[in-house]
Image: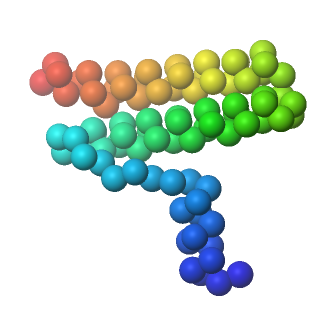
Amino acid sequence: MSQKSDNNKDAFLYPKGSYRGNFSPNNLVFNANLQEFAQKVAYICGLETNGKISSKEAYDRIKQLWHQLKASKRELLEENDEE
């Protein structure tokens, strides 16, 4: 498979939106984490919808991802507010 083909596949499977908010390294990293969260939730929903995982398992996975995102927010964004 060619490099261009790999890039197209990655762009399709892992789309990234450009960041348009107030720039800071922490905001940029949190935005990337938020996009990753959304991507993973979409995959989990697809797995549950197609019967590959149970609703409980989907809920538990999304809940775990949510806790990781909240921790990321605390570390990256709330520290900025205190400075």
Q: Is residue 74 above or below residue 9?
A: above
Q: Nearer the viewer, residue 50 or 81?
A: 50
When asked about the image quadrant of residue 12, the answer is bottom right
Q: Is residue 10 above or below residue 62?
A: below
In the rendered picture of this protein, how many numbered marks are placed on residues? 0
Residue located 43% across and 23% down the image: 71
Quadrant placement of the C terminus: top left
Q: Nearer the viewer, residue 19 or 27?
A: 19
Q: Does residue 52 appear left or right of residue 39 in this picture?
A: right
Quadrant placement of the N terminus: bottom right
Residue 24 visible to an observer of this rendering: no
Residue located 41% across and 44% down the image: 32
Residue at the right extreme, as displayed: 51
State the colouring used for the structure image: rainbow
Q: Position of residue 30 (x, y in %)?
A: 36, 37
Q: Position of residue 80 (x, y in %)?
A: 19, 27
Q: Position of residue 59 (x, y in %)?
A: 69, 18
Residue at the bottom extreme, as displayed: 2
Q: Position of residue 33 (x, y in %)?
A: 44, 39
Residue located 41% across and 28% down the image: 72
